[in-house]
Amino acid sequence: EPSAHPPVTFTIKPDKTTATPGETITYQAIIGPVENLQTAEFKLVIPDELEYTGGSSPEGLAEKMNATTAEFTSSTMKFILGGIHDYTSNSDTLLVTFTCKVKEGAAAGAKPVVKVKEGEEFFYFADSELEPKYYTINYDPNGAAVTIAAAPKPATGIALNKSELTLTAGNSDTSLT
């Protein structure tokens, strides 16, 4: 049955669109404007090219959302919002900030996407009969894609084929390599 409330936008947003092996990417999990939210839950799924390095919910999130619990457990990569009393917001709400490091050997050109575990995520409100009603969620996991760039290869030396070149103004010489 369709939700009585407008659809809710859920986003996982990286701080960069390109990263090299060894580089850290900071992500934010954000819920857009929402009416009467009562509970939410999701678990992050980290792709093979990335190594999860930690995360947390903003301090004071439970108070802000008028909830008993609003926390991200770093060891399980799971966010749980509960005991809430109809959270309504006209703007985005940051739920989690987390970081991942690009693994050494990650293929250049790969586009790893951090997602939420399908079938486990939910956001719902209760109607007047206290029946759980699920929001329609607008979620595009590809918004979290980061392109892996080749690791930079530093120069190991510079050599010239001549130690000296005389050039007259206005002329050109391509013999120096």
Image: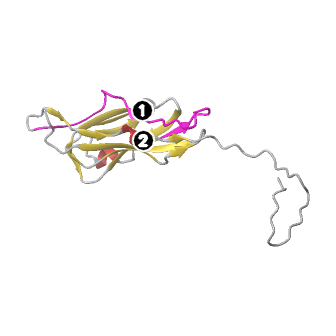
Return the residue found at the far front.
Answer: 171
Residue 48 falls left or right of residue 84: right
Write the residue at 39% across / 47% down.
59
Q: Earlier in the sequence, mark 2 or mark 1?
A: 1
Circle number at residue 119: none
Residue ID for mark 2 = 144
Magenta segment, prevailing SS (helix, strand or loop): loop
Kind of residue at disc 2: Ala
Question: Please, what secondary structure does the residue beneath circle 2 have?
Answer: helix
Q: Locate residue 28, reporting x and y percent.
A: 41, 45
Q: Quick check: marks 2 and 1 in contact, CB under 8 Å?
A: no
- Please identify the residue farthest to the bottom as the structure is shown: 169
The residue positioned farthest toward the left in the image shown? 129
* In the image, residue 49 lies in the stretch drawn in magenta: no
Query: Residue at coordinates 42% horizontally, 32% vertically from top-left?
Result: 77
Residue 68 in sight: no
Q: Is residue 171 left or right of residue 101?
A: right
Element carrying mark 1: loop
Provide residue 55's location: percent of width, then percent of height: 46, 39
Tally the numbered discs: 2
* Residue 140 can be seen, yes or no: yes
122 w.r.t. 36: above or below:
above
Q: Which mark is residue 77?
A: 1
Residues rendered magenta in the picture: 99-127
Q: Amino acid at mark 1?
A: Met
Q: Please give left or right for residue 8 compared with residue 128 in the image.
A: right
**Residue 147: x, y in percent?**
51, 41
- Residue placed farthest to the right in the image? 163
Q: Quadrant of the N terminus?
A: top left
